[in-house]
């Protein structure tokens, strides 16, 4: 709740609870000629504002910066092409306050920085930031914007594992860092194969977009099937994704990387279950890979696909010729200049050609803030629940008797002679618990959904005993 703001010496009026606005304050302020009184009123105003930037109603955002050493202040962000010349702040009288108002959509989310002289700085009064490839930016979120829950780490759900290695390409003559996300059931469901998703700018999808948290949360929530994520870090992203090495990079992907992943991990060898996706230039190379090789990648994900390099070469690759067996998911921001118009045009043409297309435009800019919050939309479209059936339980001579059954908080096993791990799988084969066998009593995870589960005792990767458990 915002506190009250003193506009007049004899009247205290709450800024958020009356018709008083920042414009009203400026009207009142314009009648004050004494510099000392001007500064007092500005200080009172700033002390009473609860959050910055100041948001009035659903659409007005007021950027406020206070600095008694500043000669000029601008704001640069997604909304003005990151050009501080397009966003100069006005000084309030002879005070240390600078301000500028904008009108945005009620659900807009935008990155920005203040430019003080020649220095680009975060908004010192706004603690909300978004990481990007060039460091953090301050974040403006309008009242109807919903922060993404799925990017937040949840300690109470099963988690996948991420393996990291260097992969040497003979085609490119260099090594790339590759990180592979293995879903929660991967280690226990050894007779099961999984869809796969290949991410350009892999390290940034993990570090800036929290893709591993998104995968964990969507899997645990039953929003997507379990899948294997392959996160590839570029060495020279401009050259590999859009420049002189783009053809060799595409060949590296389809001739070397995919065969290696399929040979070393339990992937489903089906283009309809294999996605390639990326942001900006990463979307450009993802489209070039998929539309040149639909026999390998039948799913193409575009986060603000930047198709403009090489005279819009990718537009032609995607739109010319007969339609291909590719499903496309595309998300972009309306504050991305010509990119927004091109993504709209490409989407419209794909629909006319009969493609299965998911697309969304949001009032945002070219930012990891947009891409991290919409990765779930691409994954849900590509990998709905049920693509990976429950694993076949390996026949075993030993069966577990569990009691009580149904259970709620804990269960007792009738045998403890085995050494190894206890693994609990839900009806979809998703791992919900893995722990060392410590005795006959097993404490169950909190918030388990009611239903039937498999409880396995695994020793050296082999199932030694199996029991069916009902959770009430």
Image (cartoon, rainbow, N blue to C red):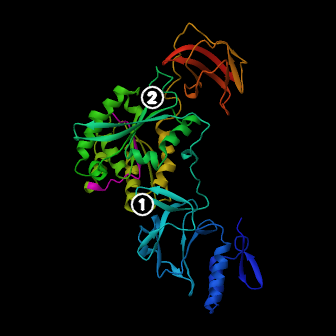
Q: Is residue 30 magenta?
A: no
Q: Categorize mark 1 by other alpha carbons within 10 Å: few (<14), some (14-19), many (20+).
A: many
Against 91, is 412 above or below?
above
Q: Quadrant of residue 41?
A: bottom right
How much space separates mark 1 and mark 2, taking CA atoms?
Answer: 35 Å
Q: Quadrant of residue 173?
A: top left
Q: Categorize mark 2 by other alpha carbons within 10 Å: few (<14), some (14-19), many (20+).
A: many
Q: Is residue 387 visible?
A: yes
Most extreme residue toward the bottom is: 33
Q: Which residue is mark 1?
A: 336
Helix, strand or loop status at disc 1:
loop
Left or right of residue 69, residue 407 in this image: right
| Label of residue 194 in the image | 2
Against 244, is 298 above or below?
above
Most extreme residue toward the top is: 397
Q: Is residue 354 visible?
A: no
Q: Quadrant of the C terminus?
A: top right
Q: Give the tally of numbered discs.
A: 2
Left or right of residue 268, residue 152 in this image: right
* Magenta span of residues: 295-309
Report the magenta stretch's main SS: loop
**Residue at horizontal 27 percent and vertical 43 percent from the top:** 249
Residue 167, image x, y percentages: 31, 36
**Residue at horizontal 28 percent and vertical 55 percent from the top:** 309
| Label of residue 14 in the image | none
Against 46, is 209 above or below?
above
């Amino acid at each position: 709740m915002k506190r009250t703001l003193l506009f007049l010496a004899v009247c205290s009026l709450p800024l958020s609870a009356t018709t008083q606005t920042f414009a009203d304050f400026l009207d009142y302020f314009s009648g004050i000629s004494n510099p000392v009184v001007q500064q007092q009123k500005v200080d009172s105003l700033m002390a009473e504002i609860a959050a910055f930037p100041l948001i009035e109603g659903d659409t007005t955002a007021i950027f406020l910066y206070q600095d008694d050493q500043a000669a000029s202040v601008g704001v640069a962000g997604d909304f003005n092409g990151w050009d501080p010349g397009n966003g100069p702040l006005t000084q309030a009288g002879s005070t240390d306050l600078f301000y500028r108002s904008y009108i945005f959509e009620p659900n807009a989310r935008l990155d920005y920085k203040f430019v003080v002289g020649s220095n680009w700085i975060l908004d010192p009064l706004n603690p909300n930031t978004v990481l990007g490839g060039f460091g953090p930016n301050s974040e403006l979120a309008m009242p109807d914007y919903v922060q993404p829950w799925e990017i937040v780490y949840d300690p109470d759900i099963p988690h996948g594992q991420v393996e990291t290695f260097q992969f040497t390409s003979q085609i490119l003559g260099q090594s790339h860092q590759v990180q592979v996300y293995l879903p929660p059931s991967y280690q226990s469901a050894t007779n099961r194969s999984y869809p796969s998703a290949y991410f350009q700018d892999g390290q940034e999808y993990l570090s800036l977009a929290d893709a591993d948290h998104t995968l964990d949360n969507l899997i645990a929530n039953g929003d997507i099937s379990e899948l294997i994520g392959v996160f590839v870090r570029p060495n020279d992203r401009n050259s590999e994704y859009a420049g002189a090495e783009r053809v060799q990079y595409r060949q590296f992907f389809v001739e070397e990387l995919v065969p290696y992943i399929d040979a070393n991990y339990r992937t489903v060898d089906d283009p309809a279950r294999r996605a390639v996706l990326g942001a900006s230039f990463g979307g450009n190379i993802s489209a070039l890979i998929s539309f040149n090789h639909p026999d390998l990648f039948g799913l193409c994900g575009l986060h603000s696909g930047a198709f403009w390099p090489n005279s819009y070469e990718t537009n032609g690759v995607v739109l010319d010729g007969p339609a291909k067996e590719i499903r496309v998911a595309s998300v972009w921001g309306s504050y991305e200049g010509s990119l927004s118009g091109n993504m709209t045009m490409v989407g419209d043409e794909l629909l006319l050609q009969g493609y299965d297309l998911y697309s969304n435009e949001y009032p945002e800019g070219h930012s990891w803030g947009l891409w991290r919050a919409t990765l779930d939309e691409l994954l849900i479209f590509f990998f709905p629940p049920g693509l990976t059936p429950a694993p076949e339980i390996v026949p075993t001579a030993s069966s577990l008797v569990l009691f009580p059954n149904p259970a709620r908080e804990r269960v007792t096993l009738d045998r403890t002679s085995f050494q190894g791990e206890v693994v609990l799988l839900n009806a979809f084969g998703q791992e919900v618990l893995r722990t060392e066998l410590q005795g006959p009593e097993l404490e169950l995870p909190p918030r388990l959904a009611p239903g039937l589960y498999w409880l396995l005792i695994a020793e050296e990767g082999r199932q030694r005993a199996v029991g069916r458990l009902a959770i009430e």
